[in-house]
Image (spheres, coloured by chain):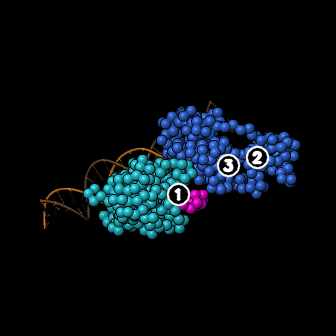
Chain colours: A cyan, B blue, C brown, D orange
DNA sequence: AAATATTTTTAGATTTGTCTAAAATTATAA
DNA sequence: TTATAATTTTAGACAAATCTAAAAATATTT
C-alpha cells in the first residue's frame, strides 16, 4: 500500500518516462513535484525498495512494469474523477485538476470500477486524455497537434496538451471546446501561427496555442 | 487547514460530546480512534492550539463553537458521500463507511455543495443519520428506539444506532431496511425482546437489536 | 487517611516527508 | 585535460503522528 506522496512521485515518473528513454533525472522529478532534489533522492530509495522503479546512483530512474501498472491505476482514478466532476457535478474543465489530485488517492477498487460503470465507461477525460481500463490498457485515439495539420482540411478538437487553467480559460474565451470542428486555412511560416475557419469566422491561433491543441482530421 | 488525523480526532470528540456534558476523557477518545492515550494527549495539544477544543491538564476535553462547526462540515461530507455511494454507485449500506472515512477529507467546498445538489439535497444518510447543511444546521427528525415503542402501534424503520457491518447484514437477512413498516405486537418483559408483525409474519427481535433500531410512529 | 488502582501526561523513539548545507559525482568549458 | 559548473547524494534537522515505558495526578478502596 502506497502513501499519497509515493503515488504522486510515481505518477510523475510515469509521465516523464513517456517521452524519455534515458533515465529520469532527479531534477526533472523535483521540478514537477515542486520540491528539492534531496527530497527526491529520499523518495527514490523508497520507490526502489518497493520495486516500482530501478535506480543506480547518479544514473537516473527507470520505471518497472509494476510501477507502470500502479501508475496507470492512479491515472485511471484521476481521470475518472475528472469525468465525474465535469459530467455529473458540472465543473468546468479548468476546475477539476486539484480536486482530482486528491480523489485519485482514495483506495477502493470497488469504488473506482463502480464509478467507471456509473459514468458509462468513458474513454477520455475532460481534457481528451485516455482513461486506462481496469487492466491498465490505454485506449488509443488518433490525434495530432494543430501545428502538424494540412491547410484546407477539416479537423475536430480532441484534446489539449497543456491542461493549465490559463490555457483552458483561453480556449473557453475563443469558444473552442473538445468536439469543436474547423477548417485549417493557413500556416503562417513567419511566426508559426495557424489561421482556422471556425463558426464562420477566421481565427488566428498563435504557435504556443497550436502546439497545445490536439486535433483529428474529419 | 487540518490534517486527516486532526479531522478524525475532532469528529470523534464531537460525537462523544453529544452524549456527555462532562469533559471528554483521553481514554474515551483513545478507544474510539483505536490508539494509545499518549497519542491522544499529543493531539489534544494540537487541536487546542487551533481553538477547536479547550483543555486543562487531567480535566477532559470540551469542543468549542469553531470545533463543532468544523466537525459538522466533516460529518456533512462523510454522509453525503455515503448517499452517493448507495444511491448512485449501488453500494450496500454496510459497504460505505470505510470509503466515506477517506472521502470526507477531500477539501473543496464547491465539490461538496455540488455533490449535495447532485444528490437532491438529501436530509439523511443511508443509515438514517441527519446530514448537516452548508451552514452546519442539522435537520431534526422525530425518532425513538424500538425498545421505547408501544404495543399495537404501527412504526416505520428510520435509522440504525449501531452502523456496524454485522448489524446491517443482520437486518438485511431479516429484510428490514429504512422505510420498512410493521406493527409492534409485544414487549417481552423477561428478556426485553420485541415481537413485531412484519410482512405478514411475526418476527421476534432481541433486546440488542431493538436497542439499535430507530423507528417512527405512523 | 493511607494504600492501591486508574487515568493522564511526559520522556524518549520511530517513520514519513520535507528542508538546508555540504560533499561527491558527472558534465561542460576553457 | 584540467578547471569550472551543474547535478546528485549525504548528513543533519524538523514537524506530524504514532509507539512504549515511566512519572504524575486523580480516583477508589480498604
Ligand atoms: Mn495526487
Ligand atoms: Mn485531465
Ligand atoms: Mn476519516
Ligand atoms: Mn452513516
Residue A184: x and y in percent read 38, 60
Q: Which residues are magenta?
A: A110-122
Image quadrant in which you'd find residue A191: bottom left
The chain containing the residue under callout 1 comes to: A
Q: Chain of mark 3?
A: B
Secondary structure mostly seen in magenta is: helix
* Whether residue A118 can be seen here: yes
Q: Is A120 rendered above or below residue B183?
A: below
The mark found on residue B126 in the picture is 3
Is residue B75 found left or right of A193 in the rendered image? right
Magenta span contains residue B145: no
Q: Which residue is mark 1?
A: A80
* Residue B76 x/y as whole percent: 60, 43
Q: Is residue A138 above or below residue B166?
A: below
Viewer-side residue, B213 vs A154: A154
- Between the C-alphas of marks 1 and 2, the distance is 36 Å
The secondary element bearing badge 2 is classed as strand
Tell me which residue sits at (63%, 43%) in the image. Answer: B121
- Mark 1 or 3: in front is 1
Query: Does any atom of ligand 4 lie closer than 8 Å to the CB of label 3?
Result: yes
Q: Which mark is residue B157?
A: 2
Amino acid at each position: 500500500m502506497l502513501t499519497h506522496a509515493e503515488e504522486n512521485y510515481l505518477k510523475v515518473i510515469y509521465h516523464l518516462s513517456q517521452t524519455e528513454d534515458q533515465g529520469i533525472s532527479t531534477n526533472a522529478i523535483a521540478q514537477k513535484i515542486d520540491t528539492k532534489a534531496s527530497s527526491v533522492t529520499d523518495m527514490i530509495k523508497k520507490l526502489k525498495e518497493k520495486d516500482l522503479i530501478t535506480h543506480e546512483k547518479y544514473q537516473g530512474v527507470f520505471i518497472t512494469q509494476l510501477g507502470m501498472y500502479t501508475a496507470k491505476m492512479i491515472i485511471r482514478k484521476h481521470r475518472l474523477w475528472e469525468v465525474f466532476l465535469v459530467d455529473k457535478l458540472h465543473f468546468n474543465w479548468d476546475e477539476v485538476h486539484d480536486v482530482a489530485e486528491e480523489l485519485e488517492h482514495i483506495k477502493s477498487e470497488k469504488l473506482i470500477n463502480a464509478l467507471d460503470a456509473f459514468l458509462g465507461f468513458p474513454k477520455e477525460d475532460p481534457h481528451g486524455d485516455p482513461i486506462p481500463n481496469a487492466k491498465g490498457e490505454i485506449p488509443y485515439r488518433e490525434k495530432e497537434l494543430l501545428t502538424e495539420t494540412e491547410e484546407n482540411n477539416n479537423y475536430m478538437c480532441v484534446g489539449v496538451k497543456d491542461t493549465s487553467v490559463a490555457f483552458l480559460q483561453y480556449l473557453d474565451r475563443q469558444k473552442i471546446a473538445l468536439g469543436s470542428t474547423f477548417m485549417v486555412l493557413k500556416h503562417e511560416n513567419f511566426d508559426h501561427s495557424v489561421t482556422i475557419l471556425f463558426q464562420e469566422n477566421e481565427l488566428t491561433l498563435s504557435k504556443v496555442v497550436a502546439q497545445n491543441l490536439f486535433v483529428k482530421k474529419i
